[in-house]
Amino acid sequence: MHTIYEPHEDSYLLLKYVPKYARGSVLDMGTGSGIIAIEAAKYAKTVLAADMNPHAVAYVHERSKHAKNLTVKHSDLFKNITGKFDVIFFNPPYLPNDLRLRDLALDGGKHGYEVIDEFLLYAREHLNKKGAIILLFSSLSNPEHIHNTLMTNGYKYKPLSSLKLDFEELYVYEIRADKKRVSRQREERHS
């Protein structure tokens, strides 16, 4: 049974940053219920909502018919995504997998960060020059690993907020390409 990820504390925490960051062209990766994409359509020129769950794609398409600047697309991360964006919102599956609870909306991989790692590997290719990623993740996703992944992939980041829950803490980060780090990495590859 494919379910659609309904908004929870994580969705509402990320939603707070939509008015500030949604501008120009927006990608809502892993759109789920579409709450971020539909809100972003109020502020941005264009919004692309993407999800690997075909039921979520159909659900958001139906809910967003009134938003003429919002398109919905089936995609496993960036596999069916072309173009560049001014901002990419991503509320990924970030929990370590649990064989008792097989839910793609929650399962971030064996350690909880594998989906985030793959996203960060390709996201910079889809960011405009001054673009930003607004990423939400959990203390259960190994923040130290995520920090290392950000640095390794040539990003700089700043925490925007956090929210303590019973069994985890949620974080929202603003992430941008670190032009100095990217230039150094290119020089190292060519020498």
Image (cartoon, helix red, strand yellow):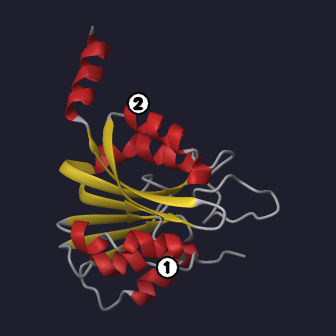
The residue located at (19%, 68%) in the rendering is 23
Front position in the image: 77 or 180? 180
Residue corresponding to mark 2: 152
> Is 32 located above or below residue 76 in the figure?
below
The residue located at (26%, 29%) in the rendering is 182
Q: What residue type is labelled 2?
A: Thr
Residue 69, picture quadrant: bottom left
First reached walking from the N terminus: tag 2 or tag 1: 1
Front position in the image: 56 or 7? 7
- Which quarter of the rendering shows the N terminus? bottom right
Label 1 Cα neighbours within 10 Å, binned few <14 / some 14-19 / many ≥20: many
Residue corresponding to mark 1: 33
Q: Tell me the CA gap for discs 2 and 1.
A: 32 Å
Front position in the image: 109 or 69? 109
The residue located at (33%, 75%) in the rendering is 71
> Is 122 located above or below residue 131 in the figure?
above
Asked which secondary structure carries label 1, the reply is loop
CB under 8 Å between discs 2 and 1: no
Q: Where is residue 42 in the image (x, y as percent from the top left)?
A: 23, 82
